[in-house]
Image: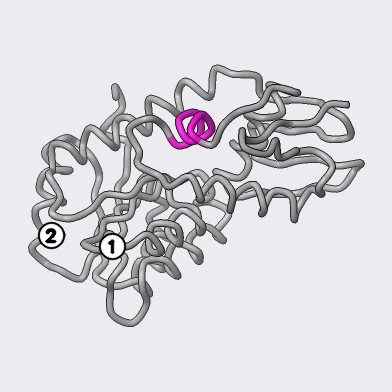
Amino acid sequence: MSEKQKVKVLVVDDEPDIVEILSYNLNKEGYDVATAEDGIKAVKTAAKFIPDVILLDIMMPQQDGVETCRQIREIPELKNTFIIFLTARSEEYSEVAAFDVGADDYITKPIKPRALMSRIAALFRREAKKEQELTQIKIKDLVIDRTSYTIDKSGKTIILPKKEFELLYFLAKNPNMVFSRDELLQNIWGADVYVLARTVDVHIRKVREKIGDDYITTVKGVGYKFELN
């Protein structure tokens, strides 16, 4: 990243040692760092600091990371903020819950600072690549606008969370092509992010709830496609 000095990172964890080591390494790499020790303070700090990246622990006092992420995603200025969950928990349900509320990545403790820096850089590389794509897709009765992350359906504006939007955008720009869950995971979340296949199903269901069932078709035993016919 050529503009590291401008990138702001919020570190949220109730363990002072983790906050200290992550803050030290992020500052050394040129990031602007803010911290919070619980979920309630994290939401307030995020609203003021407007970070580009949030490193968010799941198990915290007062308010856990999943609920904190959900509240953060409701703040319009933070809809494009990268959220990386940091957790000692490896249970499947916590991972699904994390991505369900809008996480971009999921890292299990103990955290290796150098590997974490690489993951952050990878998120920005993928975002830069996406920004080079078409900014707007007009398909059927939908106008899918990448600059505002909104969908216009017959004059009605629909706002989707980031990953739901990207999933719809990807399928819509490749109409009538069938993609497996693994292919969708790699294209939306990235090959270097470990995500369960079930996460795709959850996001597809949510997209259908918001735009209707007439667009994304399930191809049994294979995957999903945007139905053009």
Residue 43 at x, y = what percent? Answer: 41, 67
- Is residue 54 rendered magenta in the image? no
Q: Nearer the viewer, residue 1 or 137?
A: 137
Q: Residue furthest right?
A: 154
> Which residue is found at the position 45% from the left and 23% from the top?
128
Residue 194 picture quarter: top left
Is 36 left or right of 143, judged from the image as shown?
left
Residue receiving disc 2: 18
Amino acid beneath label 2: Ile
Give 116 or 228, whichever is nearer the viewer.
Answer: 228
Label 1 amino acid? Asp
At x 28%, y 74%, the residue is 60
Q: Which residues are magenta?
A: 182-189
Q: Is residue 118 left or right of residue 220?
A: left
> Residue 149 at x, y = what percent?
65, 40
Q: Secondary structure at mark 2?
A: helix
The number of numbered discs placed on residues in the rendered structure image is: 2
The image shows residue 228, relative to residue 22, as above or below, that is above
Q: Is residue 37 visible?
A: yes
Out of 79 and 173, give the one closest to the viewer: 173
Question: Is 186 a magenta residue?
Answer: yes
SS assignment at label 1: strand
Q: Residue 13 appears at what percent x and percent y? A: 23, 65
Determine crowd level at label 1: few under 14, some 14-19, many 20+ residues with C-alpha closer than 10 A.
Answer: many
Mark earlier in primary sequence (1, 2): 2
Q: Are marks 1 and 2 in contact (CB under 8 Å)?
A: yes
The residue depicted at 48 percent of the width and 36 percent of the height is: 185
User: Does residue 148 appear in this view?
Assistant: no
Q: Marks 1 and 2, Cα distance to the nearest angstrom?
A: 10 Å
Residue at point 8%, 63% (across, down): 17
For label 1, the residue is: 57
Residue 99: percent from the left, percent from the top?
46, 53
